[in-house]
Each structure stands twice: as C-alpha cells, then as structure tokens.
Image (cartoon, grey):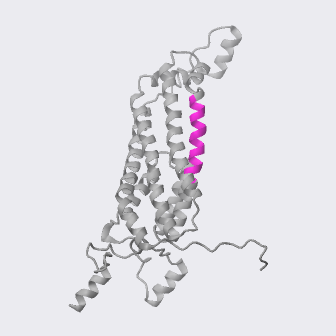
Amino acid sequence: MSPLLPQKAPPSPPQDPQITLAWEDANRKRAAACAWAAGLLTIIGATLSSLGLSGLPTFDNEAVTATDAIRDLIAGNPIPPGRIALQAEWLSSHLVMPIIGTVLYGIGSLLIFGVIVFLFKATRARNPAFGQLTLIAGAAGAVAFGVGRTVAQLSYYFGIASFDGGNNFQATEALTGGPFMAGQIVWQLGAFAIGFAFVMLGLNAMRVGLLTRFMGVLAMIVGATFILPLDQQGVLRAFWLATVGFIFILRWPGGRIPPAWISGKAEPWPSIAAARAQKASGNAPDSAPAPTLPPVASNGSGEPDTAGQLRKKRKRK
C-alpha cells in the first residue's frame, strides 16, 4: 500500500470488562427505574386521554352538512355549527382527564432517554464500533417527541377551552393555531429520531448479547411504531420498557439473563443454524445461552462468583 494513501485506523478494543461492569452496577437501578416509570406513565397517560375522549358524541343528527352550509352561504344566512364546532363545545367541559393524560404521557416519553443512555453505553462498551449517532438521535428524539407531542396536544385542548362558539371553520382555526402546528412538526421529527434510535439499539444490543432475539426484534418493532400508527396507546412500548427494566437489574423468572451482562464482554447469540447444529450435537441447551444470575458471593479476587463456580466448589467439598 502506498504510504501517501490514508490508512484506516485499527478498531478500538472493547472497554475493560471490569470497568464496564462497575459502571453498569452503579447505574442499573436508575436505568431500570426510568424504564418502569416511562412504561407506566405511558400507559396511564394514554388511558386517561382515551377515557376522557371516550364519550365524545358524533352529533350526526345535529351537525350541519356541507350541502346545508353552501345553501346557507348562498342565501346569506349564518352558517350553523358543524360537527367539529359541536364536538369542541362538548370537549370544553371534559378536558381535565385528557390534559392530565397528555402531561403524564409526555413525562414518560422524556424518561425513555435514561433507558437509551444506559443501553447505548452498555452496548458500546462491548462494541466500540457502535456509532455515537444513535445516542444523539435517542436524546434529541426523546425530548422532541415528548415535548412536541405535549405542546401540540395541550395547544389543541387550550384552543377548545377558548372556543366560544361558531362554525366548523372557526372551531378548526381556534384548535389548530401556531403552537399546535409547531408542536406537530417537532413531534414528528422526534418520532423519526427516537424510532431510529430504538431500531439501532435493538439490533446492536442483540448482536453483543445484551438483549435476547425476542427483545432485540421487539425493540426494532417499537421503533417502527413511533413512526407508523401501529401502537398509538404505547402498549408494546410499555411492555418492552417494563421487561428491559428487569433485564437491567439482572432479575428475571428463574434467574436467567443474557450472559453479556455478567461477563462485561460481547456474547453474541448463535445464529439459528448454529443453534440447531449445537442442539443436534447435544452441546447446547434447548435455547440460546442464558446463564443464571450470579450470587453475591465472591471468588476471592473481588469479582462476583458465577453459579457454575459455586457448583464446582460444592463438588470439591
């Protein structure tokens, strides 16, 4: 190779496993709390908003039709209220629950940032090639999604509260003013950014063994739901957040967790073909490797002992 050509820098080695584990131990409870709070507030906020709007009447028999409006306009008569105007008048006295639900949902969205930071740093410690763009997109996306959605929804509800009657055009003008449109733009930009972050985190955390295939794929699906109207109530998102919170604190039924959380190193999941071959040869368990949760005991060098080491000690005794 010519010395004049720029040479590609060698990849950085993974972070020292002991440093990785020490940082994760110091921050895992905080990250789990963010995950659980984000999931819970998302569900509560969406539920309150839905309940507050569940009784919204359609006014099919009372609302003026487009034909009637045109006839009144030609005749010079005042245009009576349409469906939007009548619904706005009804909503003006039913805004408490939707407003509370919107605020709680927004706070839950902001708390997702803590989950993204912890999982990103844990993944990058095992794979330094994982780019910083995911963290930037996750941070900007969580803030833009939470703040933009909250501003848009509250602007809409406050517009309803200030609407003192009129036709559909006047109601729409009051409900969708400047703050509403600005919030919508920020909301959509944030949805794309945080959706991208979820997809990249799910893929890369699964590759280094921090998430099972199910949880990694589900993270990517959740990322898609921020952009596509597939989970408007946030049920899938809340489930993923609640589950990943238990993974963060190394607690799961039966004590089985992804091995990379214990070793501090990348522990890639075997491919489906490799897993089948290992299972056929009798060298692998029925599922992907998932060691039991390490007990508090020490192996004498200051490192937590694994369940396998304790079993060996018992056999020696």
Total residue callouts: 0
Seen at 45% across and 22% down, the residue is: 92
Taking the view exactly as shown, the residue that stands out farthest to the left is 317
Estimate the x, y position of residue 179 in percent, counting from the top left.
Answer: 57, 29
Q: Is residue 87 visible?
A: no
Q: Which residues are magenta?
A: 179-195
Describe residue 182's horizontal placement relative to residue 151 as left or right.
right
Q: As rendered, which of 4 and 273 lies closer to the eye?
A: 4
Whether residue 116 is in magenta: the answer is no
**Image quarter for residue 223?**
bottom right
Seen at 48% across and 28% down, the residue is: 157
Seen at 56% across and 41% down, the residue is: 187
Q: As rendered, which of 3 and 271 lies closer to the eye?
A: 3
Describe residue 149's horizontal placement relative to residue 34 as left or right.
right
Describe residue 228's horizontal placement relative to residue 248 as left or right.
right
Q: Which quadrant holds the N terminus? A: bottom right
